[in-house]
Image: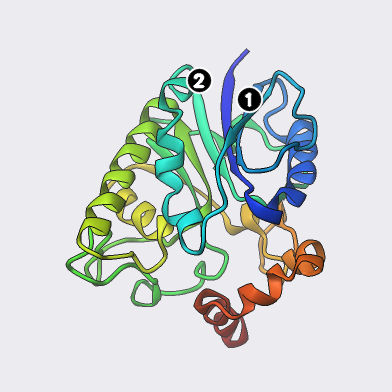
Amino acid sequence: MPTIAILYICTGKYEVFWKNFYESAEQFLLPGYRKQYFVFTDADHIYNDTSSSVHKIYQEPLPWPYPTLYRFRFFKSIEKELAAFEYVYFFNSNIKVTRPVLPEEFLPLNNEELVVTQHPYFWNKTNDKFTYERNPASAAYVPMGDGSIYAAGGLNGGTAKNYLSLINTCNDYTEQDLQNNIIALWHDESYLNRYIIGRKVKVLHPGFLYPAETTIPFEKVMHLERKQDFLKGFGKYTAEKKKPWYHFFTSLFNKN
């Protein structure tokens, strides 16, 4: 039976998304594959954590932007465990799978190194509108004109060998920038986009990260659940609205 390691981060109140993700992945994601979930969380308990397929890794909640900036550092901490799998994929916490996802559409084929997802707010934008890191001093730097797609940070993966290479290289990029007091514009996403340039990758269409806030002309394969529906009772979403990324993506939506 083929094996896939699923990486998932839910610190703080984000653990409320875990049950929906887990149940939908068990129902629809790669039927017939042996799925093992590696959940980075500070929660005492998460749904079905007594299952042999759910592995909790303690991760203290960190202030923004470190939960996303340190993503590759988290993953590197279980590198030996991940090397035992055929495939490794990361899923954003508020993803819910909505229909069966089959190997031929989701896994790397024909010597593809990695699998990334086209960002749902950039599928209809030209290269000069991509929000790559443009600071030449950053390890995530992408010169104008380079890059053919803008990948979202919320869903990516590949064979274990190739994905571990991504984890290690992007972690090195992050640490290098931190030593130089640089934080890339979109954190892990900036390093991901730098890494895939020049590599052979499978690109999933934006319907694999279908946004809650708008409609896009793609089949809804996986959708992002509305954070305000889950987190409003904790005061989280209100705080997030004050962050620069919220206003940036809201402005993109308003222009479409």
Q: Is residue 21 above or below residue 143?
A: above
Give percent across and percent down for residue 127. 35, 71
Identified at 60% across, 50% down, the residue is 92
> Which residue was labeled with disc 2?
85
Residue 255 appears in the figure: yes
Give percent across and percent down for residue 116. 48, 48
Say whether residue 47 is left or right of residue 124: right
Image quarter where the C terminus lies is bottom right
Identified at 37% across, 60% down, the residue is 190
Q: Quadrant of residue 224?
A: bottom right
Q: CA distance from mark 2 to mark 1?
A: 9 Å
Work out whether residue 241 or residue 90 is closer to the camera in this orientation and state it: 241
Residue type highlighted by circle 1: Gln
Instruction: In the rendered structure, find residue 96 and report the number of the disc placed on it.
Output: none
Residue 109 appears in the figure: no
Contact check, label 2 and label 1, Cβ < 8 Å: yes
Say whether residue 150 is left or right of residue 171: right
Dot 1: element = strand
Give percent across and percent down for residue 169. 28, 42
> Which residue was labeled with disc 1?
36
Identified at 39% across, 71% down, the residue is 130
